[in-house]
Amino acid sequence: QEYTLIKMKVIKPYPEKLNFNKKTMKNKSIFLIAATLRPETMYGQTNCWVHPDLEYVAFKLNDGSICISTERAAKNMSYQGFTNKNGEYEIIAKLKGQNILGAKLRAPLSFNEVIYTLPMLSIKSDKGTGVVTSVPSDSPDDYAAFIDLKKKPAFREKYNITDEMILPYEPIPIIEIPGFGNLCAVAVYNELKIQSQNDKDKLQIAKERIYLKAFYEGVVIVGEFKGQKVQDVKKCLQKKLVESNEAFLYYEPEKTIMSRSG
Ligand code: ZZB
C-alpha cells in the first residue's frame, strides 16, 4: 500500500508535552505526519485527527526535524530512508494522543490557514501513521467525527476541545461528483441517516458508495488543477507536495506479512 505522508507543522504555542528541551529542538520544526490515499483532497482539510488513547512517539528525521506518528510507523519509516540509520529511530518522547489534542497546525494546501488536532475514536493503530488528516467534505468518517464534535458540547468538554477549534470550520466543496454534488460525504451521511462516528456499518456503506465514483468521475473544482478529473490529478498533487518537501511517499507492508512476523 502506497500512502502520501502529509507533514502538518505544529505551530506555537505548543501543547505542554511538546516543549522538548532546547538541545533536542535546536530550532527544528515538529510535524504531525498524516497518512492519506487522497492527496487531491488536501485543499479541504479542516482539522487533524489523533486517537486520544493511542500511544505515539516523537522521533528525529534525517533532516533534524521532529515527527510524530505511531511507533509502528516510525519503524517502517526508518527502513525507508527517513531516519539517519536504516532500521533505527531515535525516540525523543512517548506521547498519548490526549497529549497532542488541541495542537495548532499548518497543513499543506489547506484553505484554512490554521487547523487543530482533534479526537477521533475510530483511528486504527495498525494502519498508516495513526494520525489522519480530516476532509469532512469527502470522507464520511471525517464528517461523522466532525459533526460529533460540532453538535455535542459534552464531547468537546471531555477532551478539552474549545469552540474555536471546531465551530468556525465547515466542509469545503473541493470535488464534484455526478449524482453526489460537491460535498459527497455530507450527501451520503444524510442519505444514510448516520448518527455518529460509531455507526460502523453505515459508514462502510457510505464509503463504498462514493469511493470508486470519486476516483473515476470526480472533478476537482479548486486549485491549480481545477476542472480536471480526480484520477488525473492525484499523482500530480502527490508529486507537487513531495517536491515542495511538504509530503513523503511511504509504503506499508502487507497486513499478512505483518501478522506472520508478529
Ligand atoms: C484524507 C482523505 C480524504 C481520506 C478523503 C479519505 C477520504 P482505506 O481506503 O480504508 O485504506 N486513514 C489513514 N490512516 C488511518 C488510520 N490509522 N485509522 C483510520 N483511518 C485512517 O482508507 C485510507 C484513508 O483512511 C486515508 O485517506 C485516511 O483518510 C484514513 F476524502 O485521507 B484519507 C472515502 C474516503 N475519503
Image: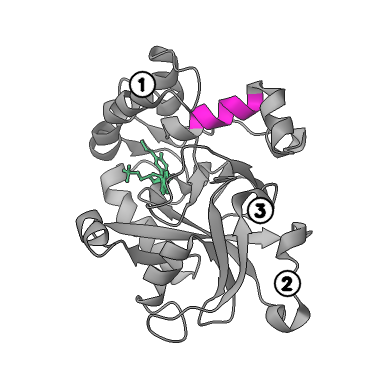
**Few, some or many residues within 10 Å of mark 1 (<14, 14–19, 20+):** some
> Which residue occupies the extreme front position in the image?
262
> Which residue occupies the extreme bottom position in the image?
85
Q: On the rendered image, what quadrant is the C terminus found in? A: bottom left
Q: Is 227 placed left or right of 28 in the picture? A: left
The magenta-colored residue range is 143-150
Question: Disc 1 to disc 3, how far (Cα)?
Answer: 29 Å
Q: Is 118 placed left or right of 241 in the picture? A: right
Q: Is 45 placed left or right of 3 in the picture? A: right
Identify the residue shown where x is 67% and y is 48%: 101
Q: Is residue 217 visible?
A: yes
Q: Which mark is residue 202?
A: 1
Give the percent coordinates (x, y) of residue 25. Answer: 70, 78
Q: Nearer the viewer, residue 166 or 148?
A: 148
**Few, some or many residues within 10 Å of mark 2 (<14, 14–19, 20+):** some
N-terminal of the pair, mark 1 or mark 2, is: 2
Q: Amino acid at mark 1?
A: Lys
Identify the residue shown where x is 48% and y is 78%: 89
* Pointer 1 with pointer 2, Cβ within 8 A: no
Which residue is identified by label 2?
20
Q: Amino acid at mark 3?
A: Ile
Give the percent coordinates (x, y) of residue 235. Answer: 31, 57
- Indicate the secondary structure of the residue bearing disc 2: loop
Which residue is identified by label 3?
100
- Indicate the secondary structure of the residue bearing disc 3: helix
Q: Amino acid at mark 2?
A: Phe
- Indicate the secondary structure of the residue bearing disc 1: helix
Question: Disc 1 to disc 2, how far (Cα)?
Answer: 42 Å
Identify the residue shown where x is 65% and y is 71%: 29
User: In the rendered structure, does residue 62 fall within the stretch colored magenta?
Assistant: no
